[in-house]
Image (cartoon, grey):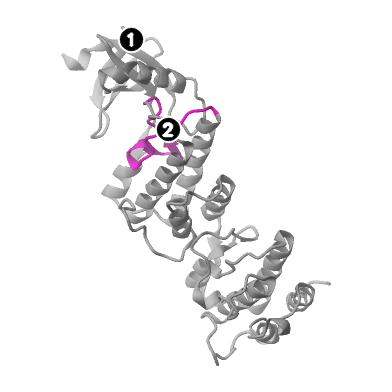
């Protein structure tokens, strides 16, 4: 009977796992459950597949489903893999609903860590998709599917597939030709990663995902809690101008969706989607003064609950109002310098100069 068949004299095949081609098996030598999968490849690729599988067996990472053994039974190669208790991302989304943004970002952090380790070892996955992502009962996301030939793909192909997988996680569908719109920073990051020109630098992708996994964007904070007190808004402004000054160059993306609030305040790097019209300086220049106008519009939104508009009153800003009037001047020369702005914001927070 198929249920009592053993591979290599030690792996007893049991029931299928999910709807795929992976089966549960019991390793009678190691006294443990394992997962096994037949390497179904054309005969001319069999040797290449075996080489890829044996290379993958040397890959060790806590977020990679480990290839434990590669066996050939009656001329057919099989992968023996670590058994992981959990459901695939594909099953989870299809049977329930898309993941919340923070959870999807945590999945992205796990997968990027796994892919970075594989790429450092010279291994391209080539099959990153929702069916190869396992969501464990302990809250981790683990990447399976190593051991198949990657057909000379580049690491950048894995990053595109990572973005497509996370797109499925938050939208319930692959990106197709039209990735999901949305001002939230995760969707903006995914659109940038899916862009034909190639993904942003790995460091930008990693930093953004890590921030989204633990912090909330300022626009999400406002949506949940409403306008913020002037002193807190001033503290956010102080943190942002410190980062603008440290960067020493035009940012171009200062807006509520790019400011993360959590253990601290962090301005995310600019992605290809650019600045929303409500936060774009009227002169359209790529200067620090333009960034300061965008910061003024952002702080206006934070304290009033809506973006600035011509003639819009400041009803909640209090001591912050004169600062916002100067920042939102249509003439760059009338806007405060970094030092002037820092002095005024510190006065509102009560912080000593």
Lateral position of residue 349 relative to residue 140, left or right: right
Q: Is residue 338 above or below residue 115?
A: below
User: Which comes before the other along the chain, label 2 or label 1?
Assistant: 1
Residue 335: x and y in percent read: 71, 81
Residue 264: x and y in percent read: 65, 59
Residue 26 can be seen in this image: yes
Of the numbered discs in the image, which one, if any, rests on residue 10? 1
Residue located at (65% from left, 79% from top): 230
Lateral position of residue 44 relative to residue 31, left or right: left
Q: Label 2 crowding class (10 Å Cα cut-off): few <14, some 14-19, many 20+? A: many
Residue located at (37% from left, 32% from top): 85
The residue labelled by disc 2 is 125
Lateral position of residue 135 relative to residue 212, left or right: left
Q: Label 1 crowding class (10 Å Cα cut-off): few <14, some 14-19, many 20+? A: some
Residue 139 can be seen in this image: no
Classify mark 1: helix, strand or loop: loop
The span picked out in magenta is 121-148
Q: In this view, does 231 lie above or below 251?
A: below
Q: Are marks 2 and 1 in contact (CB under 8 Å)?
A: no
């Amino acid at each position: 009977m198929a249920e009592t068949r053993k591979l290599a004299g030690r792996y007893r095949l049991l029931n299928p796992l999910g709807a795929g081609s992976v089966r549960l098996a019991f390793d009678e030598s190691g006294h443990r459950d394992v997962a096994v999968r037949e390497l179904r490849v054309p005969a001319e690729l069999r040797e290449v597949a075996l080489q890829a599988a044996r290379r993958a067996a040397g890959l060790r990472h806590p977020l990679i489903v480990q290839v434990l053994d590669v066996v050939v039974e009656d001329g057919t190669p099989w992968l023996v893999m670590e058994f992981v208790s959990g459901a695939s991302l594909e099953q989870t989304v299809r049977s329930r609903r898309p993941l919340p943004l923070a959870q999807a970002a945590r999945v992205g952090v796990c997968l990027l860590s796994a892919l970075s380790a594989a790429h450092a070892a010279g291994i391209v996955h080539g099959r990153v998709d929702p069916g190869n992502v396992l969501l464990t009962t302990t809250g981790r996301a683990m990447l399976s599917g190593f051991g198949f030939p990657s057909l000379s793909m580049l690491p950048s192909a894995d990053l595109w597939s990572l973005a497509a997988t996370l797109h499925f996680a938050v939208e319930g569908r692959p990106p197709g030709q039209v990735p999901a719109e949305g001002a939230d920073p995760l969707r903006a990051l995914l659109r940038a990663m899916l862009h034909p020109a190639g993904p942003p630098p790995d460091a930008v992708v990693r930093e953004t995902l890590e921030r989204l996994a633990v912090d909330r964007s300022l626009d999400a904070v406002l949506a949940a809690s409403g306008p913020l007190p002037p002193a807190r808004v001033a503290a956010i402004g102080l943190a942002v101008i410190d980062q603008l000054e440290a960067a020493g160059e035009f940012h171009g993306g200062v807006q509520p969706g790019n400011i993360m609030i959590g253990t601290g305040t962090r301005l995310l790097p600019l992605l290809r989607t650019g600045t929303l019209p409500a936060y774009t300086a009227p002169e359209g220049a790529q200067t620090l003064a333009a960034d300061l106008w965008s910061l003024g519009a952002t702080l206006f939104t934070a304290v009033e609950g809506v973006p600035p508009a011509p003639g819009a009153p400041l009803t909640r800003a209090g001591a912050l109002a004169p600062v916002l009037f100067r920042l939102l001047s249509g003439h760059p020369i009338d806007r405060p310098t970094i030092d002037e702005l820092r002095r005024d914001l510190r006065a509102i927070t009560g912080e000593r100069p």
